[in-house]
Amino acid sequence: RPVEFMLDTGASDVSIPLPVAEELGLKKGRPVTYQTANGPIQAWQTVIDEIRLGELRVGPVRASINPHDSGESVLLGMSFLKEIDFSQQGNTLTLKYPDP
């Protein structure tokens, strides 16, 4: 389903708020601790089969289910971003597949 997202180059994995993960039917994997700007949090590992962003399709993607986030916005961390090229010029962010 479509979700609102924020790119987060400081996040190791894609982070999905618990309500969104439940709606998507994602399975909670093993517990994991992440170090955040607000201190350590406990989350669950999961895998997303595919993330589509316009014409970009990446998957499977390592992610976490964050029970401390009750919002709707997904953080696209480096487990997604490492698979694409991204650059910023002024107010424009460009995402594309890497050149072969």
Image (tube, rainbow, N blue to C red):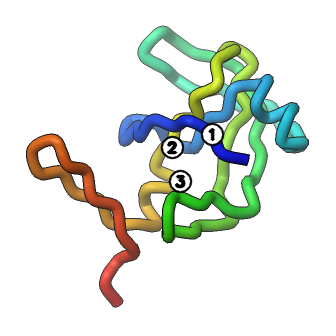
Q: Which residue is mark 3?
A: 79
Query: Which numbered disc, 1 or 2, marks the residue that appears first in the sequence?
Result: 1
Please tell me whether residue 33 is drawn above or below residue 9 in the rendered image: above
Q: Which mark is residue 29?
A: none
Q: Which residue is mark 2?
A: 76
Who's the residue at 46% across and 66% down the image?
83
Distance from disc 2 to disc 3, alpha carbons, whole Å, reads 8 Å
Disc 1 crowd rating (10 Å Cα; few below 14, some 14-19, many 20+) is few
| Residue type highlighted by circle 3 | Ser
Which of these two is toward me, 31 or 11? 11
Distance from disc 1 to disc 2, alpha carbons, whole Å, reads 11 Å
Please tell me whether residue 42 is drawn above or below residue 64 in the rendered image: above
Which of the 4 image quarters holds residue 52?
bottom right
Dot 1: what SS?
A: loop
Residue 26 in the image, given as x and y percentages of width and height = 85, 43
Which of these two is toward me, 57 or 9? 57
- Residue 6 in view of the camera: yes
Who's the residue at 69% across and 26% down the image?
17
Residue 16 in the image, given as x and y percentages of width and height = 67, 34
Residue 89 in the image, given as x and y percentages of width and height = 11, 51
| Residue type highlighted by circle 1 | Val
User: Is residue 44 rendered to the left or right of residue 15?
Assistant: right
Please tell me whether residue 6 is drawn above or below residue 94 in the rendered image: above
- Residue 29 in view of the camera: no
| Residue type highlighted by circle 2 | Leu
Q: Return the residue found at the far top.
A: 38
Query: Which numbered disc, 3 or 1, marks the residue that appears first in the sequence?
Result: 1
Which of these two is toward me, 25 or 28? 25
Dot 3: what SS?
A: helix
Q: Which residue is mark 1?
A: 3
Distance from disc 3 to disc 1, alpha carbons, whole Å, reads 17 Å
